[in-house]
Image (cartoon, rainbow, N blue to C red):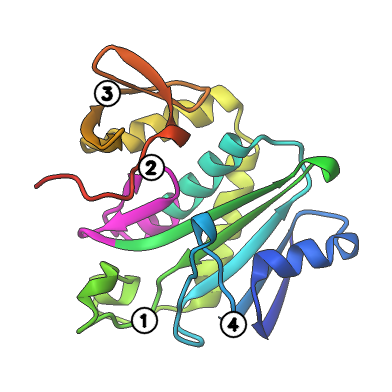
Amino acid sequence: MRHFHLKRIDSTNRYMKDHLGSFNENTLVTTDFQTAGKGRRERTWQSEPGKNFLGSFLIRQNINHFQALMIATLTVRQTLLDLEIPVTVKLPNDLYSTDGKICGILIERLHEKERTIIGIGLNVNEDFKGRKDLNATSIRTITKEEHSIFKLKDNLIKNMKYYLEQPYATLFDTYKKAVFERPVYAFFNGTLVEITELNQKFECFFEDRWVPCTELNFDAPASN
């Protein structure tokens, strides 16, 4: 997998889309700072310059959106577990550690090109003290020491390659186990429900029904 690093760009996902013709293999583009970092639902992703891993993987294999999400989630999860950092998966696109968000994932499927862009924002060395409104944490905050972003990049690439090679059923079983390591809650039509099952079509089961996960709100906080 090729890797390109840029000091400052608007968004690694956008850069990938703008330069698709330049990459003829699976590629990672990283940056020190994004001027217009994107999150899910057109939200912004903010990060101190040079403090965190900000990157986008261009996957040239023909994988679907949910497969890409599973690959990305398990890649980051394993990278954190390798550092002995506790991590939980929060549907649909986040990873948490010690009750703070440590990573966000943005999947963009380019159907006409049979390409997928996986954007990953992983908090590495940023200090979130005094910024409780962000509900965020970082590897440094948890381990009490600085970490090499480039070493983490190498581990992310290694784990990404591994999960790209896994059969869909194996990916799903591993992903579902990770999701249900803790109770899963969501809001459906304004009502808090507990999700008790997940299927390969990315439908969630609660009470007596299956509902596409896209119709649920996982962003509202679950009751403590």
- Residue appearing at x 47%, y 45% in the figure: 74
Among the 4 quarters of the image, the one containing residue 180: top left
Magenta residues span 78-100
Which one is earlier in the sequence, the residue at label 1 or at label 3? 1
Q: As shown in the figure, which amino acid type bears the numbered disc 2?
A: Leu
Q: Which residue is mark 2?
A: 91
Q: Which residue is mark 1?
A: 126
- Is disc 3 placed on a helix, strand or loop? loop
Q: Is residue 221 magenta?
A: no
Among the 4 quarters of the image, the one containing residue 81: bottom left
- Residue appearing at x 12%, y 45% in the figure: 223
- Is disc 2 placed on a helix, strand or loop? loop
- Is disc 1 placed on a helix, strand or loop? loop
For residue 35, the mark is 4
For residue 196, the mark is 3
In front: mark 1 or mark 3?
3
CB within 8 Å, label 1 to label 3? no
The one of 69 and 190 positioned closer to us in this rendering? 190
CA–CA distance between discs 1 and 4? 17 Å
| Within-10-Å neighbours for mark 1: few <14, some 14–19, many 20+ | many
Which one is earlier in the sequence, the residue at label 2 or at label 3? 2
Q: Is residue 96 magenta?
A: yes
CB within 8 Å, label 2 to label 4? no
Identity of the residue furthest to the front in this view = 189
Among the 4 quarters of the image, the one containing residue 30: bottom right
